[in-house]
Image: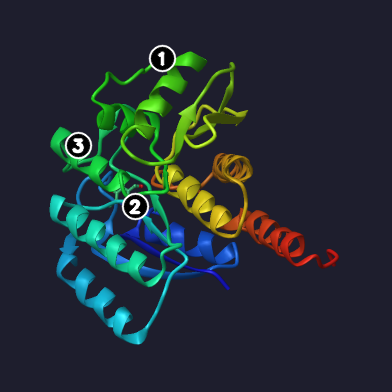
Amino acid sequence: MKRIVTIQDISCVGRCSLTVALPIISALGIECAVIPTAVLSNHTAFSGFTFCDLTDQITPIVDQWQREGLTFDAVYTGYLGSFEQIRIVSHVIDVLKQTNPELRVFVDPAMADFGKLYTGFDEAFAREMTSLCKKADIILPNLTEASYMLDIPYPASGCSEDEYKTILRKLSALGCPTTVLTGVSLHENRIGAMSYDRNSDTFALYENEHLAAQFHGTGDIFASVVTGAVTRGMTVPDALTLAVDFTLACIRETCADPDHRWYGVNFEPVLGMLTAAAHDLKNRFSGECPS
Ligand code: PXL
């Protein structure tokens, strides 16, 4: 069984970061280890929040794992709260690579959405995040994060295909071989993601229905699905398709719930999509007949 370690905060209420990464990666049939970087009462889009910083726990946890001889197939980083955390996590990646040179590194530079940085972040933090992206095999920014990292204006009314491709190439020039951009919309009422593979110089686009509703946490859901699916052996274009379809299913489910909460999406009722995909992958790679 594959094992991923995900490094991000735990927002106790909010359906984001660890509270979505854990169930999604587990549903994809992968052991999910965690390094919580901070404990928040709720995510930062609420009117207030408590914040218990766990920066000083990161290195001792990894050192102990080294003593136990634990190795990981992939590391997946999400929301990080400070420059220091970016630097420590960057070092953790080096350490984990020593024990598994095949380690795949997924970086979601979770720090902004809908044209704005999240509470507590500034342009300097966005620049620092590019240093972590250099270490990644796959980065997964949304259009807002891409704009901040590249220091270009946020294209609020979208882009042409060539403009998206230029953004992807520039992101790739940060030093990462595979780049996935979310929030890509090339056709009316459609939205999805586009990827760029630097080695083959190829792009892949997948869009599905664009529902008008906007919810928090969908970037974390998307990144968790891509990370899990690629770790299970899916190609990046196939993983994009699964992640876009799953994220849309979560949004549909949320919109259909008259009592839905504002702060995140109802991903729980559609987790079966991921267990089915994981089952399918198992059959594909083991040569067994589907039961
Ligand atoms: O969903 C990204 C995210 C993760 N963690 C925390 C957040 C946010 C977005 O606001 O505040 C603490």
Spatial CA distance of label 1 from label 2 is 26 Å
Q: Residue at x 83, y 63 (%)?
A: 290
- Could you tell me the amino acid type at mark 2? Gly
Q: Secondary structure at mark 1?
A: loop
Q: Is residue 114 above or below residue 85?
A: above
Please report contact status of discs 2 and 3: CB closer than 8 Å, yes or no: no
Tell me residue 81's x, y (percent). 20, 52
Q: Farthest residue to the bottom: give it.
A: 68
Reading the image, the residue beneath label 1 is 157
- Could you tell me the amino acid type at mark 1? Ser
Please report contact status of discs 1 and 3: CB closer than 8 Å, yes or no: no
Spatial CA distance of label 1 from label 3 is 24 Å
* Side of 216 relative to 24 (left or right): left
Pointer 1 local density, CA inside 10 Å: few below 14, some 14–19, many at least 20: few
Q: Can you see residue 260?
A: no
Tell me residue 29's x, y (percent). 60, 67
* Side of 158 relative to 55 (left or right): right
Q: Secondary structure at mark 2?
A: loop
Q: Which mark is residue 78?
A: 2
Spatial CA distance of label 2 from label 3 is 16 Å
Q: Is mark 2 within 8 Å of ligand 1?
A: yes
Tell me residue 211's x, y (percent). 56, 29
